[in-house]
Amino acid sequence: MRTLDQWFEEYAVSHQNPKNKAIHYICVPAIYFSIVGLLMSIPSGFIASTLRLNAPIIENWAAVVLIFVLLFYIRLSVAMAVKIAIFSAICLAANYYIGQFVTLWLFSIGVFVIAWIGQFYGHNIEGKKPSFLKDLQFLMIGPAWVVENLFSKKIRS
């Protein structure tokens, strides 16, 4: 099993161009955020009744899926799992409030599509294919790489 640093090193190979990196710093969190919004848009009556949950932010499919996402990160790094958990909680709360004003699934699809266009544009600038085409696990490494690069004292290339 690869370490988080090994994943980051391999991910960084196709993310060297400063413009591509900047695009990723915006688009990767936007994609993560939009996926949380899409998952929150799935009717949650089954989860709420089965688990007897009353808190509106956690009684949805996003919370259930994010538990498994956090297990993936815990395997790699507890510290990174905590950072992703904080970001996930922000995504849950922000999507909950956005959903009070607009149709959340439509908003989330819009963000998702625009962010992926940005991602592919960034890779066009870079001249390299997205890492996830090599290994789908890079879809999970991208958010961690962004968090690590934006919020750590040690900036990775």
Image (cartoon, grey):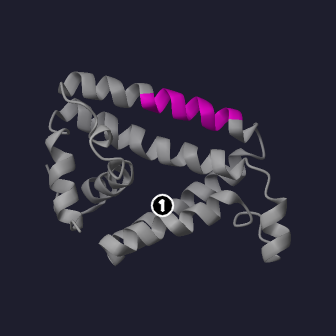
- Judged from the image, the secondary structure of the residue bearing numbered disc 1 is helix
Near-viewer residue (113 or 129): 129
**Which quadrant of the rendered structure holds the N terminus?**
bottom left
Quick check: can you spot residue 142? yes
Residue 138 in the image: state x and y as whole percent.
32, 49
Identified at 72% across, 47% down, the residue is: 41
Near-viewer residue (105 or 156): 105
Near-viewer residue (114 or 49): 49
Residue 113 falls within the magenta-colored stretch: yes
Identified at 22% across, 57% down, the residue is: 7
* Residue 18, placed above or below residue 155: above
Residue 57 in the image: state x and y as whole percent.
71, 63
Q: Left or right: where does residue 109 sit relative to residue 103?
A: left
Residue 119 in the image: state x and y as whole percent.
36, 31
Q: Left or right: where does residue 2 sit relative to residue 105?
A: left
Mark 1 crowdedness (10 Å alpha carbons): few <14, some 14-19, many ≥20? some
What span is in magenta? 106-116
* Residue 12, placed above or below residue 117: below
Residue position for label 1: 87
Would you identify the image quadrant in which residue 74 lies?
Answer: bottom left
Q: How many marks?
A: 1
Identified at 18% across, 34% down, the residue is: 18
Residue 133 in the image: state x and y as whole percent.
31, 37
Q: Which amino acid does label 1 sit on?
A: Phe
Identified at 48% across, 42% down, the residue is: 30
Residue 6 falls within the magenta-colored stretch: no
